[in-house]
Image: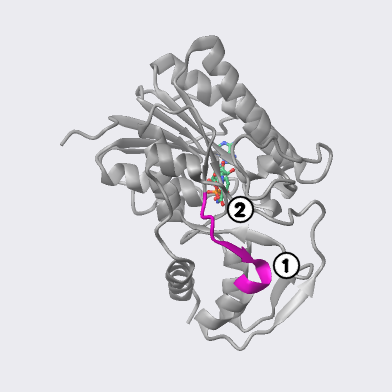
Amino acid sequence: MRPRWEHAVVTGGAGFVGSHLCTALMDQGTAVTCVDDFCTGSRENLSHLEGRAGFTLVRADVSKPFEVRRPADLVLHFASPASPADYLRLPLHTLETGSAGTRNALALARSWGARFVLASTSEVYGDPRQHPQNESYWGNVNPVGPRSVYDEAKRFAEALTTAEFTSHGTDTAIVRLFNTYGPRMRGHDGRAVPTFICQALAGEPLTVTGDGRQTRSLAYVDDTVRGILAMAASDLRGPVNLGNPDEITMLGLARLVIELTGSRSEVRFIDRPTDDPAVRCPDITLARGKLQWEPEVPAREGLDRVIRWFRERRPA
Ligand code: NAD
């Protein structure tokens, strides 16, 4: 069977989600060029693909002009620092990547007549006043708060992607990803799942911010990747939410990780970061109806897989 796409460009393909996307595309017979500057990703995330026929790795910062020699029929724009620890460390780079980087990735898609998919985020909803969040909610973002470098970069990237379609007719799509977790997250990237798992495996206290009652909804990476590829294969423009509507409090997550790891760790409460959203839960009516997509991996099963992955990487 012919693959749906001959050749896909994945910006940010050396990162957590991007590396799973590259793998899924290669496994279905699509050649992949990953473009990444390794600011938060790593070559190691792609070691299983390097040397495989059809896989090319280009080291480049997408916010500067860059070249991909072979035309592609799909561009997945995933380059961007994504964890708060990373974008607070790289504020200007994050804004450049969302703005100039998105413009450059869109220009490539336009020049080839390729389908373009922007990885946007639930962070465009900020600290939401509507719960759960559907795609028509405009959000509540502090434009000068510390998180704005990420939230506003993504909001601008959405605006740019929309203008690209209306001005040039480029075949664009926008997905808004909610928190995704899985193997290849970095243990100390500041996101709750890898942080709690590494703390539990090390027998250290699990650091829960605030009173732990704030909620997130966690999707396992295989579910997220399946949703992204369903969006790429559709003719929808979006934005479309992709996330798991099973909401969990941060304290509940910490307790679940302690239970699943069998750790003797305790919970320690620490200060909550500025503008940290109180709730986060996707309304996925659109994805269910138009993409026939919904998450399949339950939290216990997904967390078990990630715990196993981190265990295997712990020094003996
Ligand atoms: P990640 O940090 O693991 O991966 C991001 C990748 O982009 C890294 O490999 C990094 O080196 C690369 N990158 C960053 N800036 C670049 C630039 N200017 N040029 C080239 N490469 C660059 O993060 P992730 O969790 O895999 O997120 C991937 C994408 O999905 C991001 O766009 C993020 O905003 C989006 N997203 C992720 C989540 C999630 O829960 N993981 C949720 C919402 C949105």
Answer few, some or many: residues within 10 Å of disc 2's Cα (few below 14, many 20 plus, some between 14 and 19): many
Q: Residue sitting at 54 percent across and 59 percent down?
A: 218
Residue 7 lies in quadrant:
top left
Give how far apart the Cα atoms at labels 2 and 1 are.
14 Å
Residue 295 lies in quadrant:
bottom left
Answer above or below: position of 290 versus 304. Answer: above
Task: Point out residue 121 in the picture as x, y percentages from the top left corner.
Answer: 60, 42
Point out the stretch of residues depicted in magenta: 243-253
Residue annotated with mark 2 = 281
Quadrant in which the N terminus is drawn: top left
Task: Point out residue 82 in the picture as x, y percentages from the top left corner.
Answer: 62, 47
> 295 and 12: which one is in front?
295
Tag shown at residue 184: none
Residue annotated with mark 1 = 213
Mark 1 sits near ligand 1, with its Cβ under 8 Å away:
no
Q: Classify the position of ligand 1 by quadrant: top left, top right, bottom left or bottom right.
A: top right
**Amino acid type, callout 2:** Cys
Q: Earlier in the sequence, mark 2 or mark 1?
A: 1
**Amino acid type, callout 1:** Arg
Residue 38 lies in quadrant:
top right
SS label for mark 2 = loop
Q: Residue sitting at 35 percent across and 24 percent down?
A: 70
